[in-house]
Amino acid sequence: MTAPSIAVRTRDVLLFEWTKFRSVRSTYWTLLIAAVTALGGSVITAIANSNVGGGGLSLDPVASIFLAWLEYPVLALGILGLLTFTAECGSGQIRTTFTAVPQRLAVLAAKAGVAGAVTLIVGELLAFVAFFMTQTILSGGTNAISLSQPGVLRAVLAGGFCLSAVTLLGLGLGAIIRHTAGSVAALPAVIYLPLLFATLPSPWNHRIGRFTPVLAASQLVNPHPSVNFFSPALSFVVLIAWPAVALIVAGLLIKRRDA
Amino acid sequence: MIAVERLVKRFGRLTAVDDLSFMVRPGHVTGFLGPNGAGKTTTMRVILGLDAPSSGSALVGGRRYQGIVRPLREVGSLLDANAMHPGRTGWFHLLSIAHSNGIAKQRVAEVLRLTGLETVARKRVKGYSLGMKQRLGIAGALLGDPPVLIFDEPVNGLDPEGVHWLRELFKALAREGRTVFVSSHLMSEMALTADRLIIIGRGKLLADTTLTELTESSTRKDVLVRSPRADELAGLLIARGAGVARDNDGGLAVTGMDAPAIGDLALEHRIAVHELTPRRASLEEAYMDITRDSVEYRAGLEPGP
């Protein structure tokens, strides 16, 4: 038997992770909760704010109304990400996984690929559905929004992307901590605790704050980003860097540790 | 073929495997024996690339496990029947493993049939008994139809029918020319399954032998003699240079003289003999002799003499 090519081996491990991903209930629970909180959050906020602001337009309808939903599915999808690793550690499945594919980095990469791709698709779907629902509710009012307004399409696309990024951050944390409860506790800390830097005296609140995941995300999803923080393009890099660093650390540890 | 050479595995200050070398050859069921904590599981984990050795090596078919692409086609293993996600069905568990090594889907149905799990394959693993999980683990090991098979305490949790099935399976796999390496802490189990034995204690090799050799190596041989005039007979035996020990119920354990000679001596003195049984230390006892000094966790009370 000749050695299978890299492409064949990549397909093997992706199919492996995909089959595992779609055959446990936690995947469907977390995705369902993400969808319900996302759509529910955006609809409620849209109804509550359909006529707030009046002629002066003191609030940005996209940032304040449409994107309010984003805060809620973040935890559900972050947990989905970490569970793809920690559920295997807790049950011992990880030993079966590493026996089937001893190339551990390939396993981690395939997990990231599967969870990242699924949540990117689901995230974009939710973002656009939430946007059109919000738009329907707001249409005719003072806060009506449309995709053709400057920065709005980028904001909606970024909304879906953020969910995928937080899933990968969760996966990275899970692979580092290897314990479900520990990772679930760490996830909101890693996402929200850096916001404390935004309370530092000026200008440090902005200089450090722009590196935090929440403020980077808010720059990305705001059609009118703040001039105090990074541009949307740089914020995109910051947002990718968080899960990337977590996954790189996990990748360094995964080869060294006994399974 | 499995080749373990000068393998050392330390966990902090504890040395779990200590300069261990042995070979496991194809065509045999090789038993891997040792008391609890002897290092059997650790050795198997190193062979399968789950633990990194502190020094030395463990090769399968001449290669490190981690370097094998699609390893399940080379080595099938079951270390822990609980190493599966409880929320996944047996069928999906096997399907995912099959995908990971490019194994055809119909092979999943085959191993399910082979292990008798067809009827529960669509149920979640959390509803399985330990015996069913053990069968599912064995199904996973057989999935890639590998020439080398490694099992850690595979009979745990199986019912007698399952144990019998497994013994026959191991023998059949060995007859097909495969390398079958099975650990156990029970000599009695290995006596029925294995033809070669690797015995370790405290991480060190104690014996690399065959079942037959182990039986013959046992030095303890005696003859149990019962007689209504035991005291008189004991005196005569001692006078002829035999060793005599009394057991609790009046029997004599005679060493240094074989059964015919004892019988003739008794006849000569018209002493009735009610029992005359040549005894040899059982495999179990031979194993206990070998491992006596390396039992990790001993019960607090030593049995009386």
Image (cartoon, coloured by chain):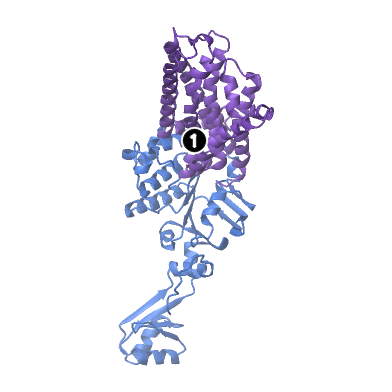
Residue A199 rendering spot, x and y as whole percentages: 62, 31
Side (left or right) of B49 relative to A231: left
**B291 lies above or below B183:** below
Residue in front for this viewpoint, B121 or B198? B121
Please give the chain letter of the residue carrying mark 1.
Answer: A
Vertical position of residue A234 compared to residue A97: above or below: above
Identified at 47% across, 52% down, the residue is B152
Closest to the observer: A80 or B107? A80
Q: Which residue is mark 1?
A: A84
Q: The chain coloured blue carries which letter?
A: B
For the question of whether residue A37 can be seen, the reply is yes
Q: In the displayed structure, would residue B134 be above or below residue A195? A: below
Helix, strand, or loop for circle 1?
helix
Question: Can see residue A110?
Answer: no
Residue occupying image coordinates x 60% and y 38% = A250
Badge 1 amino acid: Thr
The residue lying at 46 percent from left, 60 percent from top is B185
- State the image coordinates of residue A137 (x, y, percent, origin top left): 42, 12
Pick the residue in front: A161 or B263: A161
Residue A56: image location, x then y, percent: 53, 10
Residue A225 appears in which quarter of the rendering? Answer: top right
Split into 4 quadrants, where in the image is the C terminus of chain B?
bottom left
Name the quadrant containing residue B263. bottom left
Shade representing chain A = purple
